[in-house]
Amino acid sequence: MIAEAESSPPVSFNHEGVVERVMPHYYKWSKVYGDPFLYWFGSDAILAVSDPDMIKEILVTKSGSFGKIRPNPAVKGLLGEGLVELKGDKWIVHRRIAAQAFNMERVKEWVLEIVDSNRNMMSKWDANIEARNKSEFEFDVHKEFHQLSADIISRTAFGSNFSEGKRIFELQEQQVVLVMKTAQNVYIPGFRFIPTKRNRILWKLEKEITELVTKLIEKNKNTKQNSSTLLTTLTSPSKKDNILDLKEIVDECKTFYIAGKETTANLLTWAVLLLGLHQEWQNKAREEVDRVCGQHAFPCADNLADLKIVTMILNETLRLYPPAVMLMRQASKNVKLLGRLDVPVGTQLFLAITAVHHDVRIWGEDANVFNPMRFLEPRNHLASFFPFGLGPRVCVGQNLAIVEAKIALAMIVGRYSFVVSPSYVHAPMKSLTMQPQYGAQMIFNRRS
Ligand code: HEM
């Protein structure tokens, strides 16, 4: 079904077909069997859920009865045994360190670095405009935003920059494609040790990435002792019981390179595409940025909270195109949900974020329409909008993601006006996160 969805003819640029394209099995079976429904993936029973009350119980009120699923070993190679995959006491220690590194006060200290990264990206765009001697230029913003968020995570988490981590990101991109293909199949025990063509490439990639990350850690831990990055917090923890060994540090770095880059790059890509399509919102955002930051000036830590329209636009983007398409959990004991549904130990749960975000019963008849006004007031149900997850495992990089996306969007609308190129083909697709299958071609004009 995934292959069919990805090869189906492109749709016109509206937001109706998103669920069908990124989770085709959920889309088809929920229509036939209702919600929740149970299906099998090999020997695993999976309960697909999109009821916000049930999701709240699973992720928040009864979170102690639901853990992370046992990952496909191919995914383990991608994230190592980092925070996303850890459980139990180890998770508590690693989470404490990461939460310290990404609290809002820390993130605000990085605003200047984030602005600087954006300036470098835009200088490159300007050089492009000048070189062509044209007032407008077309390019794929998806690629640009991957580089931007790679640079930002390198600077903020590791005290380095994109060019130092470039090879790691390139190898991880190749790894993601192969791992996602592998994870679509039922895992047969021991299969990862068989020297198939794909496994051999994956082994090689994992080895090279581990070597490069280890070198980067060795280099930066000695030179950047004064800075307050994730890496310095990992390598010189303030408490004795937070000391991690080299393998644990390497695995955390792999996790943060992936988690910090993919998600935010895709959020920005969809936000810019949506503003290219909805010019009225692009204009509203621009007026706000000019008013709050001043024309030709950049956002700073003190005025980020005043960018209310920009925040509403980002929330509406996260609703329609959530980078994390769904979440998985597994019952660690027998549980009763909503006092009526018995879930036996071992059952896996597929929490359909994208379906909840597009549900007309929750968002009204215009659920598939881009309307940032819905975020003017605080939302009334916790689990009707949860792009960063909920409960104890909620995204630890959320502050960085929001600050990074606000700054980038504000700087871009402040400097350029843009439209979607006629060559853009609308085809949302689930890789590790939701992305445009054929890139995001846009036409930019420099404001005078
Ligand atoms: C728009 C951007 C982002 C989105 C939509 C997003 C989404 C999510 C979601 C849904 C989860 C929960 C997974 C679950 O419950 O199974 C999560 C966890 C996580 N995210 Fe993010 N994320 C974003 C940005 C980031 C950034 C920038 C970083 C790193 C700097 C990051 C690092 C992590 C980590 C390490 C976890 C695992 C936390 C734990 O299990 O304790 N994320 N993210």
Image: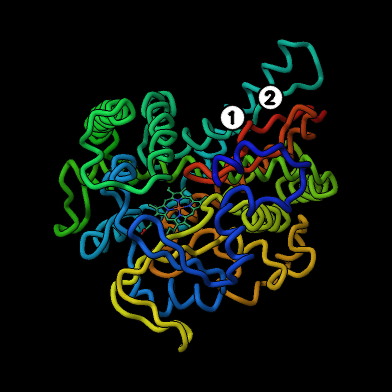
Write down the quadrant of residue 250 in the picture. top left
| Residue 247: assigned label | none
Q: Residue at coordinates 21% horizontally, 59% vertically from top-left?
A: 90
Compare residues 415 and 95 and report the one nearer the observer: 95
In front here: 67 or 47? 47
Q: Label 1: few (<14), some or many (≥20) within 10 Å?
A: some
Decide: marks 2, 1 in contact (CB < 8 A)?
Answer: yes
The residue drawn where x is 23% and y is 28% is 195
Q: Answer yes or no: is residue 219 visible.
A: no
The disc at residue 144 is 1
Find residue 391 and report its horizontal and vertical position in percent: 43, 70
Question: Residue shown at 47%/57% (left/top)?
Answer: 104
Examine the rendered structure and indicate whether residue 215 appears above or below residue 268: above
Q: Report the side of 226 relative to 293 (left or right).
A: left
Q: Residue at x 22, y 52 (%)?
A: 237
Residue type at the position of mark 1: Glu
* Percent x, y of residue 97: 29, 56
SS at badge 1: helix
The image quadrant that residue 181 belongs to is top left
